[in-house]
């Protein structure tokens, strides 16, 4: 007796579904790192003071990478990316009080203890869009697109290291792509809290 092609197809789908469900039940779930060791997304707020009368404020989210490298002595190298919205205030001899808005994305490397709490150091470099053109104390940026580099030191504490405070030094300039390129430096105090 010859079966119709639809019956072969139907039987094949039933066998495939049966094999898939048996395999899904037999396969263990992927191993998850302990909750304290899992990277956590965080919300942050920071205030900064720059050269002359420059002041800055920013809020944003830090998104952790899955990439982590164990180091000697219980430390690790990890990474995250900041997504930030900020505001700068300054003084210009021509315009008086000045303001600019900043949008930034900054990948950052961090060296710190593998556990949830402890001291860390970090460095990052990213892209920033500052509008309108920044003017402060007789200097002005030559472009709205700028690079931002920072170095920081901080402390994580609390359940699962859910709180952080850090002190950062940041330099922003357009790397000579456009003139003038005076750059701006900020000392920043930052607080962040885990979102999960």
Image (tube, rainbow, N blue to C red):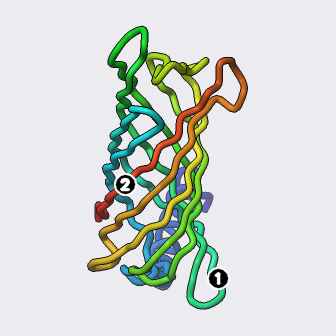
- Nearer the observer: mark 1 or 2; the answer is 2
* SS at mark 2 in the image: strand
* Label pair 1/2, CB-CB below 8 angstroms: no
Q: Residue most toward the bottom? A: 73
Viewer can see residue 179: yes
Residue 20 to residue 151: above or below = below
Q: Position of residue 146 (x, y in %)?
A: 59, 30
Asked if residue 4 can be seen in this view, the reply is no
Crowding at mark 2 (Cα within 10 Å: few <14, some 14-19, many 20+): some
Residues 22 and 161: in front is 161
The total of numbered circles placed on residues is 2
Q: Is residue 164 above or below residue 35?
A: above
Q: Which residue is mark 2?
A: 189
Residue that appears at 61% across and 47% down: 125
Quadrant of image for the C terminus: bottom left
> Of the numbered discs in the image, which one, if any, rests on residue 71?
1
| Relative height, residue 194 to residue 35 (above, below) | above
Q: Residue at x 42, y 14 (%)?
A: 93
Q: Nearer the viewer, residue 23 or 50?
A: 50
Residue at 59% from the left image edge and 46% from the top image edge: 149
Outermost residue on the right side: it is 176
Q: Secondary structure at mark 1?
A: loop
Q: Quadrant of the N terminus?
A: bottom right
């Amino acid at each position: 007796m010859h079966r119709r092609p639809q019956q072969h197809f139907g039987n094949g789908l039933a066998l495939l579904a049966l094999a898939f469900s048996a395999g899904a039940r037999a396969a263990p779930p992927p191993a998850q790192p302990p909750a304290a060791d899992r990277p956590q997304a965080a919300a942050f707020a920071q205030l900064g003071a720059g050269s002359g009368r420059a002041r800055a404020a920013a809020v944003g989210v830090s998104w952790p990478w899955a990439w982590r490298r164990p180091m000697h002595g219980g430390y690790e190298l990890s990474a995250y990316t900041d997504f930030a919205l900020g505001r700068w205030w300054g003084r210009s001899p021509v315009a008086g009080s000045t303001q600019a808005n900043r949008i930034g994305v900054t990948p950052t490397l961090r060296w710190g203890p593998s556990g949830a709490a402890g001291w860390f150091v970090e460095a990052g470099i990213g892209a920033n869009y500052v509008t309108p053109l920044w003017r402060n104390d007789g200097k002005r940026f030559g472009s709205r697109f700028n690079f931002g580099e920072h170095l920081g030191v901080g402390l994580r504490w609390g359940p699962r290291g859910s709180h952080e405070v850090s002190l950062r030094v940041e330099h922003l300039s357009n790397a000579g792509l456009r003139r003038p390129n005076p750059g701006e430096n900020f000392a920043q105090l930052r607080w962040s809290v885990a979102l999960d």
